[in-house]
Amino acid sequence: MRNRVREQRTQREMSQAELAAALGVSRQTVISIESGRYLPSLPLAFTIARFFGLTVDKMFDPDVEEAGT
Amino acid sequence: MTAFIRPRLRKPLGIALAGTAFAAAWALRGGDAWQLSIAMEVTVLVSAITTYVRAGEDNDEGALAGSRADERQKLLSLRSRALGWNFAMVAAFIGVTAGVAVKATWWWPFLVILAVGAFAYLLGLSNYGVAEEGTADDADTSPQVRSPAS
């Protein structure tokens, strides 16, 4: 599953640590989500989508497979 | 129960308390090897201090040691504990099977471990809602309308 977390974060010129603090998760979890190695829970997916002002299906694209997901 | 203890202190304190209890039991046991309890206590305290230091690190291990894990880190810990449980059960099964095969007297502690593991697993299924999935919303008991195809 592809996601747009990295794209949205870099557009806002945020660091991974800043995004992690805003979402209430660790920096390592933001890295894992961005790389597609970890699929967030539904509540966290909503939190991420709302943070960036997008819907969950705009933030996470289930039609694209990534290695490790 | 541990809410009043600072998260970073929880695991180090747990290690210190459990280790001290075991070292004290060893000392109470007496005999020639009672001095080992001192070495055990030193090792326990070093482990507790090491865990406290690691709990301050900015990585997954630090988050787990510092009791501040997020959902991914909790999942990692949960999966690791499940793997540990699987290994313990396999080891206990091998132990009880080997013990029975050689007519040893030490086979029953392995059986106890297997029984405790099995009980804990069933308790987990019960506690975490395996029987609470509810009924399907199409499980209506009223007379069914026959499908035109049937």
Image (cartoon, grey):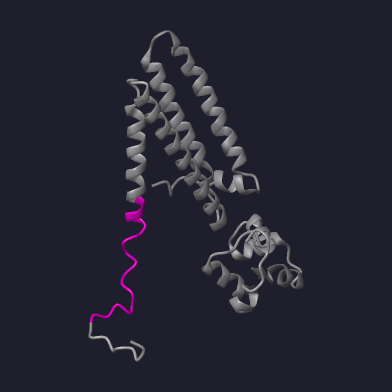
Q: Position of residue B145 (x, y in %)?
A: 28, 89
Q: Extreme top residue here?
A: B32
User: What's the residue at 55%, 56% (across, down)?
Assistant: B70
User: What's the residue at 29%, 77% (across, down)?
Assistant: B139
Q: Extreme bottom residue here?
A: B148
Q: Identify the image quadrant of residue A10.
A: bottom right
Q: Identify the image quadrant of residue A37.
A: bottom right
Q: Position of residue B102 (x, y in %)?
A: 37, 21
Quadrant (top left, top right, bottom left, bottom right) of the C terminus of chain A? bottom right
Q: Position of residue B81 (x, y in %)?
A: 49, 44
Q: Extreme front residue here?
A: B150
Check the image and report above or below for B113 versus B120. above
User: What's the residue at 63%, 58% (across, down)?
Assistant: A29
Check the image and report above or below for B93 versus B82. above
Residue B77 falls inside the magenta stretch: no
Question: Quick one: A66 or B47, which is closer to the camera?
Answer: A66
Most frequent secondary structure within the magenta stretch: loop
Question: Quick one: B122 or B69, which is closer to the camera?
Answer: B122
User: What's the residue at 38%, 12% (across, down)?
Assistant: B30
Check the image and report above or below for B141 versus B78. below
User: What span is in magenta?
Assistant: B124-141
